[in-house]
């Protein structure tokens, strides 16, 4: 038998069959053995070779010829964390970390990283390269690396060191180079967009368009009291189950630690107050002030020698005039000063304290005596002639005058100290028994209060505070049943809470929501009745009747409003939007329509005339601004279209389980 089997499998037919069977195994199984590795990407982007754009995605063609880039999981997590911090900073106390952890937010972050890789691949394939000079200019233009508007190498190094993790200049330069390369194609495309004069004219006509409209408001019918059968209720419930789910709720117990209600001994002794006064005497000194005026002859620090000489000659001439007997310094300043701020007031600068003026000006001013006029003083702004009109010497505020402020500060510090000690004592008791509030509350003689059950949008009282609400619905407190860390809801005001009951979001039976289902069915009946009435009225208008006549049949009032502009609430912004979405009526005809308002009523309207805007009414600056804004919009759309088109030419694989 074995000999017969060997004879049958050793012929040329068997060899051909075996060869044919080898082909699919070579193409569809070998890569599992040849290219085994630990896959860690969040997304993989692959592009066919430029010389074979229609190359198939079969292995080994894809493995050997296609270009591949990956979005690493760590890169995705870092980007997502940055997005989280930005959202937290923007929303403040309203930020909900659980809500942010949605699939949509993760995909938005990943899509942005994928688009960057797509653009990087496209730029490389197009031969786009970023020179060292471009990288240097881009880095030096970043405000975070500048001091007084100029690039500062020391600040640059400190900023890179402060990054998490720290970056070397070479690594940051490479990151900047990659960013410039990725953004070059869409940026240049967006900047190349332009709007023709004809397009601007058309846009102005559209934006300035006005429409003659007649409208009437169809109110909701009277309350529906007709019975709702069990079959109707069951059908509605099955079709709208998501609307009748019970939301997640919690019940909490909490202790309110309010520093404002703590008994504090806030009556300091004279010795305590005097010690504080002596230690902080510098706070109770009124600084010296000088009432000054000046004349400024402005000249830039980098002006040429001719301009510098002209300014110096002018200030010397003004200085001589100011020193003449009976000279009016204020009149001279009003006529000649280049300081637009003080010139109308005769150069008056008001009372000046040390540290408020540039160094040369301040040095000269505080070296003068009352009534003197300084020699010309050079600063970064130009030349100054200073007049010191009056001196108010600094003085020490006596202890008795400072006493009320010292007592107030002492009371505040004592209250804060007592609050911190009280909170620390309470928290120590909590740590001894972290799953109960009552023992710790009893130790400090505070009541344990209870609140709930409540949902995220139903919280009242202390739970309405965003920080408290966030803690109440945190996974840790719900699962562990432990007492929270102190939650600050105001200065010297903390709350400690514990979740005592939690009900997850869940489906409710029809019996539990029967009343809500019946109310929803009756509301839907009213809405459909109003819509049917509105549709019947529109049909009559289309048949040739006027809207006024149709409205009168329904005992409704119709209004004619000529020249309605865009955005006007006639009678509602949504209604006006519908007027402008209606087609332009034919000659002698109207364009009827309807739109539902937030209160459930329906506006039935008829557009009888469309008047284009007049481009001549727009000034030249307005036309230019309109063209620029329109070009920016067009450029942005072009850039987005480019990214979408490039992405369609590539194969993107997303590892959902790693997000």
Image (cartoon, rainbow, N blue to C red):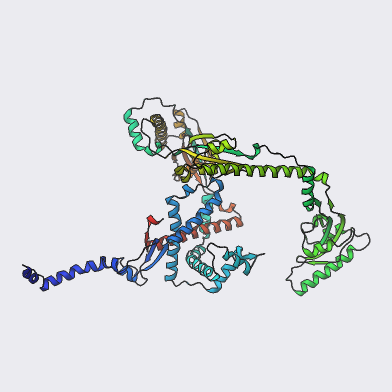
Q: Residue furthest right?
A: 325
Where 600 sits versus 428, above or below? above
Q: Where residue 261 appears, x then y in whole percent? A: 65, 36
Left or right of 363 on screen, residue 459: left
Where 151 sits versus 500, above or below? below
Instruction: Tell me the quadrant of the picture where the N terminus can be found.
Output: bottom left
Q: Which image quadrant for residue 644?
A: bottom left
Left or right of 26 on screen, residue 236: right
Q: Where residue 284 appears, x then y in whole percent? A: 80, 50
- The residue nearer to you, when weighing 134 against 551, is 134
- The residue nearer to you, when weighing 487 against 18, is 487
Q: Is residue 296 visible?
A: no
Q: Which image quadrant for residue 479?
A: top left
Instruction: Tell how many labels.
Output: 0
Q: Where residue 127 appears, x then y in whole percent? A: 44, 73
- The residue nearer to you, when weighing 263 against 564, is 263
Q: Residue at x 36, y 27 (%)?
A: 228
Q: Residue at x 59, y 52 (%)?
A: 617
Q: Residue at x 47, y 66 (%)?
A: 182
Q: Where residue 145 appears, x then y in whole percent? A: 61, 65
Where 525 sits versus 34, above or below? above
Instruction: Tell me the quadrant of the picture where the C terminus can be found.
Output: bottom left
Q: Is residue 622 visible?
A: yes
């Amino acid at each position: 038998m074995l000999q017969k089997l060997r004879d049958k499998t050793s012929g040329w037919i068997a060899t051909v069959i075996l060869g044919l069977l080898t082909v699919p195994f070579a193409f569809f199984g070998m890569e599992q053995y040849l290219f085994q590795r630990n896959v860690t990407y969040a997304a993989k982007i692959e592009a066919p070779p430029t010389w074979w754009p229609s190359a198939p995605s079969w292995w080994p063609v894809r493995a050997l010829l296609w270009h591949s880039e990956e979005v690493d999981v760590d890169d995705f997590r870092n980007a997502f964390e940055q997005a989280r911090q930005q959202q937290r900073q923007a929303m403040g106390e309203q930020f909900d970390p659980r809500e942010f952890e949605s699939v949509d937010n993760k995909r938005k972050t990943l899509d942005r990283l994928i688009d960057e890789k797509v653009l990087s691949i496209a730029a490389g394939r197009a031969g786009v390269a970023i020179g060292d000079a471009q990288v240097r200019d881009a880095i030096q233009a970043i405000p975070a690396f500048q001091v007084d508007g100029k690039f500062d190498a020391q600040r640059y190094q400190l900023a890179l060191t402060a990054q998490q993790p720290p970056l070397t200049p070479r690594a940051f330069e490479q990151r900047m180079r990659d960013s410039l390369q990725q953004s070059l194609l869409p940026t240049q495309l967006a900047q190349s967009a332009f709007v023709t004069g004809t397009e601007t004219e058309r846009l102005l006509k559209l934006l300035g368009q006005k429409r003659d409209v007649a409208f009437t408001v169809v109110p909701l019918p009277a309350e529906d009291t007709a019975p709702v059968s069990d079959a109707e209720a069951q059908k509605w419930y099955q079709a709208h189950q998501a609307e009748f789910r019970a939301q997640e709720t919690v019940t909490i117990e909490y202790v309110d630690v309010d520093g404002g209600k703590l008994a504090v001994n806030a009556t300091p002794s004279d010795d305590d107050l005097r010690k504080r006064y002596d230690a902080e005497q510098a706070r109770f000194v009124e600084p010296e002030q000088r009432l000054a005026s000046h004349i400024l002859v402005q000249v830039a620090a980098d002006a040429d020698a001719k301009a510098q000489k002209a300014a110096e000659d002018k200030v010397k001439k003004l200085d001589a005039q100011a020193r003449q007997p009976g000279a009016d310094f204020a009149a001279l300043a009003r006529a000649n000063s280049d300081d637009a701020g003080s010139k109308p007031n005769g150069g008056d600068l008001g009372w000046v304290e040390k540290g408020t003026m540039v160094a040369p000006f301040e040095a000269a001013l505080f070296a003068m005596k009352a009534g003197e006029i300084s020699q010309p003083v050079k600063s970064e702004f130009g030349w100054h002639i200073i007049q010191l009109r009056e001196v108010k010497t600094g003085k020490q505020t006596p202890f008795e005058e400072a006493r009320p402020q010292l007592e107030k500060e002492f009371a505040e510090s004592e209250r804060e100290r007592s609050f911190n000690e009280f909170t620390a004592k309470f928290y120590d008791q909590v740590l001894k028994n972290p799953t109960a509030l009552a023992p710790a509350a009893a130790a400090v003689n505070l009541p344990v209060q209870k609140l709930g059950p409540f949902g995220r949008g139903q919280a009242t009282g202390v739970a309405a505070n965003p920080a408290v609400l966030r803690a109440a619905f945190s996974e840790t407190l719900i699962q562990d049943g432990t007492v929270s860390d102190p939650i600050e809801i105001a200065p010297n005001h903390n709350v400690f809470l514990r979740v005592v009951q939690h009900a997850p979001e869940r489906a409710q039976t029809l019996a539990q929501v029967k009343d809500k289902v019946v109310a929803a069915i009756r509301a839907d009946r009213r809405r459909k009745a109003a819509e049917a009435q509105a549709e019947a009225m529109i049909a009559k208008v289309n048949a040739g009747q006027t809207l006024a006549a149709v409205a009168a049949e329904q005992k409704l009032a119709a209004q004619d409003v000529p020249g309605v502009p865009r955005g006007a609430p006639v009678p509602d912004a949504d209604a006006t939007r519908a007027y402008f979405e209606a087609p332009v009526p034919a000659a002698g005809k109207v364009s009827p329509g309807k739109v539902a308002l937030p209160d459930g009523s329906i506006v039935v309207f008829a557009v009888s005339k469309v008047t284009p805007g007049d481009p001549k009414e727009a000034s030249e600056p307005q036309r230019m601004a309109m063209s620029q804004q329109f070009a920016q919009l067009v450029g942005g759309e072009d850039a987005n279209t480019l990214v979408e088109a490039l992405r369609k030419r590539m194969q993107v694989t997303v590892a959902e389980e790693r997000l």
